[in-house]
Amino acid sequence: MFWKNRKACSQMADDFAHLPPCKGELITVLSIDGGGVRGIIPGVILEFLESRLQDYDGKDARIADYFDVIAGTSTGGLLTAMLTAPAPDNVKRPLFEAKDIVQFYLRHCPYMFPQRRSGIFSYFAKTRDMLGIIKGPKYDGKYLHKLVNDVLGGTKLDQTLTNVVIPAFDIKLLQPTIFSTFKAKAHCVKNPRLADVCISTSAAPTYLPAHYFETKDDEGSSQSFHLVDGGVAANNPTLVAMGQVTKEVDRKNKEFPAEMKPLDYRKYLVISIGTGAPLQEGKFDARKASKWGAFGWLVGEGTTPLIDIFFQASSDMVDIHAACLFEAIQCSDKYLHIQEDNLVGDVASMDVTTEKNLGDLVQAGKALLKKQIHVLDIESGKLKPHETVGKDVTNEVALDNFAKLLSEERKRRLKN
């Protein structure tokens, strides 16, 4: 593991920790979508963001030092844990630097999602896979589970270095389960191991097995969880994160300014990072889908249409709502959504881990940084170039501007 070989952080790093929003002016939120192996794309984006924060505040700066809430679903939940779990050699600093994420994915994804043979046997392998998911999940999850348990160990949810919000979905209760540091600190039965949270939020139906675990408090009370991927309910967890903050403000959590109103969204600074979406014009054809039965919706055209549609619809609806919200309160400059919406072929999949596809995902992330900033067209639901900024304002430039705002907010908190 990467963290086992890292040197202990300096004393300067010990002093470089997250400060509560009651000492500043803004509520800062980072949200990371689900998307399986496409988590490489936000990994590239996060590496750039952290490098800019380090340019402003020194090499010991880490993303967890700047955000009041980091939310992630599925692969985004794994990234959230990597950025916020304490390192074993220094519990005041994160387990991973953002620059470690991509290499971690490149190293481990081929074992999480092992590929079948290519060439003359590829057709038969795909057929076997399609038939296999009718009987059980496509992957057994053993490598992923062992990896997550090895990396996170016994770390509990209340030990994260800033507040995290990670959705999952309880298939016994048929309702979302929102894991958060806020809840974990308030109730023992809502304070599971971070490893169990990560395994749960990444348990995509048909891909990986559902996850069961229990929690107990000191009085013997227990709670059981029967969970699958959080993307079923909130593949883009931006609004879930904002909702958790609203609850904490309403209950007068001392981390937040006493004068703040629960729905005062003008104080929010939000970065939402997607994992990429298929080219909108070319995924599925209604003329073909009209002939699908249960089997076709599960494995049509060699993919999982039902799962893909649910996850994508979940992400898009959240982006539409968030974009409308910040536009309505005339604070569009405080909401940055970075998303690639024209993925085609293997890069649009959640589990193709060939060397070529992993490399293509890295390049997709780098190319996304260089693209002009886009905003959501609320009428069409599609991304379009930002009309009020020049073509030279790329996602890279926008992230740099947000890094400045985050640095300024941190300096304000340090003064107070």
Image (cartoon, rainbow, N blue to C red):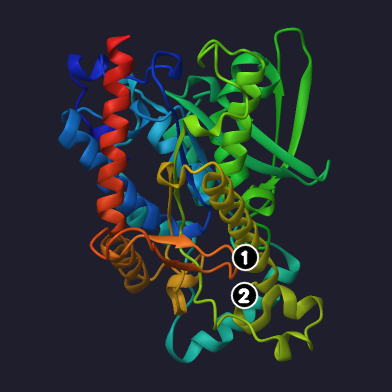
Callout 2 secondary element = helix
Say what secondary structure mark 1 lies in: loop
Question: Considering only vertical position in the picture, is 229 above or below 256?
Answer: below
Where does the image place residue 136, in percent across and percent down from the top left?
71, 63
Residue 298: image location, x then y, percent: 71, 73
Circles 1 and 2: CB atoms closer than 8 Å = yes
Q: Residues within 10 Å of mark 2 (few under 14, many from 20)?
A: some
Amino acid at pointer 2: Asp
Is 233 located above or below residue 138 in the figure? above
Residue at 64 percent across and 47 percent down: it is 230
The reply, left or right, for residue 6 in relation to residue 250 is: left
The residue depicted at 73 percent of the width and 76 percent of the height is 297
- Image height check: is 176 above or below 160? below
* Residue 129 numbered mark, or none: 2
Q: Is 150 displayed left or right of 50 in the figure?
A: right
Position of residue 122 relative to residue 81, above or below, is below
Q: Work out which quarter of the rendered image holds the N terminus and state it.
A: top left
For the residues labelled 1 and 2, the Cα–Cα distance comes to 7 Å
Instruction: Determine the residue positioned at 26% across, 54% down.
Output: 396
From this viewpoint, is residue 147 visible?
A: no
What x and y, as percent, mark residue 374?
Answer: 40, 62
Q: Position of residue 282 (x, y in %)?
A: 54, 83
Q: Nearer the viewer, residue 396 or 17?
A: 396
Q: Amino acid at mark 1?
A: Lys
Choose between 175 and 222: the one closer to the eye. 175
Of residues 196 and 407, the one nearer the viewer is 407
Which residue matches tag 1? Answer: 138
Residue 416, visible in the rendered structure: yes
For residue 136, side relative to residue 50 (left or right) = right
